[in-house]
Image: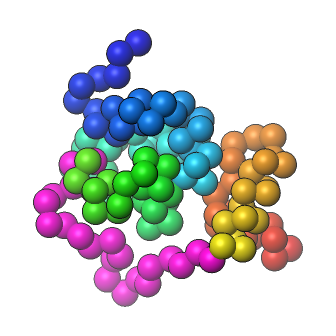
Amino acid sequence: MDVAADNAIKQRRAELNLTQQEAARRADVSLATWRRFENTAADIGALDGFRTDNLQGFARALKLSLAALRRLAGAEPGDESEVGEGERPVVVDRQTVDLVRLFNKSFTGDPLTPADAMALSTT
């Protein structure tokens, strides 16, 4: 099946030869979250519905900067506001990323989000 010409996110994923499942794993999000991202990416303001760490994961999986992801997804040019008013950016250290990957490899369901992995690691 050909990738729809009007969906730049799907095109980018296809260029990288990634399945939706592999892209979701690389972004450390669930498959459902990745699909919602891909299917709504062309809508105005679609990225507003995702947490900052999810956006960073999407960009990482697609090998893009966050600004390039916003442009590709159709966000307004020059709209570089990654963080809402009063919010601080999410900083994830290497240990947390490794822990999320360990949980994702061990988990048989949808991959865990970084927030889920952190909640599990502190219990």
Magenta span has 88? yes
Q: Is residue 115 above or below residue 86?
A: above
Residue 13 rendering spot, x and y as whole percentages: 42, 36
Q: Is residue 11 found left or right of 27 in the rendered image?
A: left
Task: Work out which residue is located at the far left of the displayed protein and give it.
Answer: 77
- Residue 49 showing in the rendered view: no
Q: Is residue 107 found left or right of 8 in the rendered image?
A: right
Q: Nearer the viewer, residue 14 or 109?
A: 14
Residue at 31% x, 83% y is 85
Q: Is residue 19 above or below residue 62?
A: above
Magenta span has 86? yes
Residue at 81% x, 40% y is 108
Q: Is residue 64 above or below residue 92?
A: above
Quadrant containing the N terminus in the rendered view: top left
Occupied quadrant, residue 8: top left
Residue 2 rendering spot, x and y as whole percentages: 35, 16
- Residue 17 showing in the rendered view: yes
Residue 37 rendering spot, x and y as whole percentages: 42, 45
Residue at 33% x, 71% y is 82
- The magenta region covers 73-93
Q: Is residue 111 found left or right of 48 in the rendered image?
A: right
For the image, the number of numbered tags is 0
